[in-house]
Image: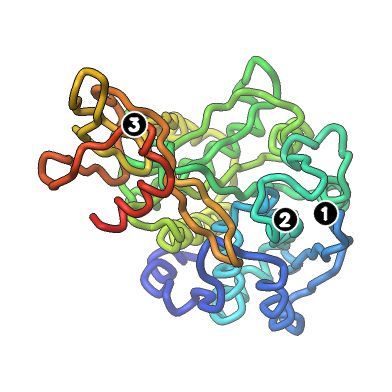
Amino acid sequence: MDLITFYTTAYSTYKETKITGRYLTQLDIEPILKKYEAAFKISHIGNSVLQKPIHTIYIGNGKKRILMWSQMHGNESTTTKAVLDLLCFIQNNEAFRTYIINNFTLCIIPMLNPDGAAAYTRVNSNEVDLNRDAQNLSQPESRLLRNVFNEFEPHFCFNLHDQRTIFSAGKSRHPATVSFLTPAEDKERKVTANRRKSMEVIAAIDKILQKFIPKQVGRYDDGFNLNCVGDTFQSMGVPTILFESGHFPDDYEREETRKYIAYALVAAINYIGETEITGKKYHGYFEIPENDKLFYDVILRKFPVKTKNGIEYKDIAVFFKETLLNDKIEFIPSVEHIEPHLHFYGHKELTMSKIEVAPVEIDRLNNSYLTEFLKKI
């Protein structure tokens, strides 16, 4: 079934419009889950540390089983939005719904870490990174995921995350808007049979995404860490794909990136459904550039700085710190580096010689000053 052209053309029709922005909590998704109770099998499988409910969504009764989970890190909500878009497409497009039901059994955990989501933190309420708890299984959320994995026995796992704005797609000035990884199974990072199958699927997704975000797809370093969930599941014999939502220019709410993750999910499902995946077509994975860290959020070029030697012109690198204030994410600027010339890229770059600006002492370049300065320009 050729879904991609149709879905990418009609995406806005199937976007879950009730969910937007970066701050996404269990309270936000509960009404959507309730809406789908009649169409999908939605189960309350347990609770977080703070007794917030964690759910699974089962769709279809086909032979190919895919397990996906999102918001393992509470402050990584873009893939959750894309999953809700996927549900909207399944529910409201009869041809796609029939295709899924007949060919797949999907098991989706839309929000694994609701406590972290509410606090907008990476970790859970015990300050444990669930993606480093795959061996200890010290947290209730980790144990719930492992129980689902064991009972469901998936053929593929989709591990859904967000990444920081620092990543470039290779050593280029193109941001890594979407990134992928097939985790290693051992310290030697051997290209095993399971990894080749993951690589083949990723290569197929990349081919689709290049039509929409050319040169903006990256590949993560595959350093091995068995404490990570993806590495563990891959080592347990299940081809696992890490999806990472990154930065698209002027899209700090990640609504554009959300769309490309939704495209990637449909592309992956379509490829798995239409292909006997042997791993032989894995070479395209290595054509995806490995991510580098070449970006800041803003670079102020040739900014006049007062020093004891007089006025000097410096490049100032600024990161935005995502901060939860009054149930909204604010992007607070923070100076990271001040150097004569920064060999990095900014998602926004401003040359001060083109803007009238008074020289400033370095110790005045704090959050408050930058916030007001960036508002003015």
Residue 62 makes an appearance in the image: yes
Q: Which mark is residue 288?
A: none
Quadrant of the drawing holding the C terminus? bottom left
Asked where in the image residue 236 lies, by quadrant, the reply is top right
Which amino acid, by three-letter code, is at mark 2?
Answer: Arg
Nearer the observer: mark 3 or 1; the answer is: 3
Q: Where is residue 161 in the image (x, y as percent from the top left)?
A: 59, 48
**Where does label 2 land, which residue?**
65
Q: Position of residue 139 (x, y in %)?
A: 86, 44
Asked where in the image residue 186 lies, by quadrant, the reply is top right
Decide if residue 73 is on the left or right side of residue 280.
Answer: right
Q: Tell which residue pokes out farthest to the top in this image.
A: 188
Q: Distance between the residues labelled 3 and 2?
A: 57 Å
Q: Distance between the residues labelled 3 and 1?
A: 57 Å
Nearer the observer: mark 3 or 2; the answer is: 3
- Contact, mark 1 vs mark 2 (Cβ under 8 Å): yes
Mark 3 neighbour class, 10 Å CA radius: few under 14, some 14 to 19, many 20 or more: few
Q: Which mark is residue 362?
A: 3
Mark 2 neighbour class, 10 Å CA radius: few under 14, some 14 to 19, many 20 or more: many
Mark closer to the chain start, 1 or 2? 2
Q: Position of residue 318 (x, y in %)?
A: 38, 39
Q: In the figure, 109 relative to 246: above or below?
A: below
Which amino acid, by three-letter code, is at mark 3?
Answer: Ile
Q: Position of residue 107 (x, y in %)?
A: 74, 60
**Where does label 1 land, which residue?**
152
Q: Is mark 2 on a helix, strand or loop?
A: strand
Q: In the figure, 266 relative to 141: above or below?
A: below
- Contact, mark 3 vs mark 1 (Cβ under 8 Å): no
Q: Is mark 3 on a helix, strand or loop?
A: helix
Mark closer to the chain start, 3 or 2? 2
Which amino acid, by three-letter code, is at mark 1?
Answer: Phe
Q: What element carries label 1?
A: helix
